Image (spheres, rainbow, N blue to C red):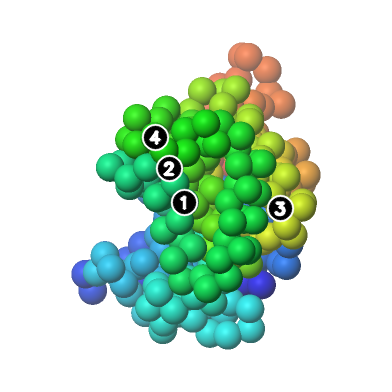
Amino acid sequence: MLQVNNIEVVYANIIQVLRGVSLEVGMGKIVALLGANGAGKTTTIKAISGLLKTEEGKIIDGSIFFDGKRIDRLNPQKIAAMGMSQVMEGRRVLEHLTVQENLMIFAHRRKDRKEVKKDLETVFDYFPRLRGFYRRTSGYLSGGEQQMLVIGRALMARPKLMLLDEPSLGLAPLMMEEIYEIIKRINSERRMAILLVEQNARAALSIANYGYVMEDGRIAISGLAEMLMDNEDIKEFYMGLSSVGSEKSYRDVKHYRRKKRWLS
């Protein structure tokens, strides 16, 4: 479904952010892209969706293919029309519009009005809370409800691939679990491919098929989600866990070598 081939990205022709990033998202799969702040995760998905061009960013090397077609030279509108929806970090609802108006915005290109109504019902099936807030101004929703709204809004475009940027950011644990269960259900029922960008490695890998970990604009490690969940590096740097006991010291040789490798 998606192939990112060794891309390099610069901002303002000066600052290089991505250095040879490659990844794949298979048909109907959930792929997690993990990493700390500043690792290059958001830049990667903006390069995929074309939004990079709106921020003085540019792909200077490599290529991106979506559904068999090269897209790294296309604008965001054309990429979206091909069947890609991006849910941006920070719950970007249109605060002065109602829930109804927010949802219908992503269906504005569609001519199949009967199917639009069916998809609206599907969104309410995934997110029952939104039905009761149908005519409420979106800015008055809670953070979790706004996250549900932006995911539902993206679904209204009937995408083949959804890009989710930090869907758990700022949410209470119970709300995060609820939203992740819904994401998993959407993937299962609609066979929709999802690229999930997260700092919360435990949550992302719990529903993903495959994962990539970014460090300093590069892919540092990748593998099946189950493998990454058991990886000592992932446990230590992203889950706060380690097989070494509570008396662990930075002088420990194994820990030192691992940390040196990740930060080099």
Q: Nearer the viewer, mark 3 or mark 2?
A: 2
Q: Are marks 2 and 4 in contact (CB under 8 Å)?
A: yes
Mark 4–mark 3 Cα distance, whole angstroms, equals 28 Å
In terms of secondary structure, where does tag 4 sit? loop
* Residue drawn at (26%, 65%) of the image: 55
- Could you tell me if residue 41 is visible in this image? no
Q: Are marks 2 and 1 in contact (CB under 8 Å)?
A: yes
Disc 3 marks which residue? Answer: 187
Mark 3–mark 2 Cα distance, whole angstroms, equals 23 Å
Label annotation for residue 85:
none
Query: Counting other residues with Cα less than 10 Å from the Cα at mark 2, is it few (<14), some (14-19), or many (20 or more)?
Result: many
The amino acid type of the residue labelled 2 equals Val
* Residue drawn at (76%, 52%) of the image: 189
Within the image, what quadrant is residue 156 found in? bottom right
The amino acid type of the residue labelled 1 equals Leu
Q: Are marks 1 and 4 in contact (CB under 8 Å)?
A: no
Mark 2–mark 1 Cα distance, whole angstroms, equals 6 Å
From the viewer's perspective, is 262 left or right of 12?
right
Mark 2–mark 4 Cα distance, whole angstroms, equals 6 Å
- Counting residues from the start of the chain, the first of labels 4 and 3 encountered is 4
The amino acid type of the residue labelled 3 equals Asn
Above/below status of 249 relative to 85: above
Indicate the position of residue 117 as horizontal and vertical percent values: 59, 56
Disc 2 marks which residue? Answer: 99
Is 59 or 68 nearer to us in this picture? Answer: 68
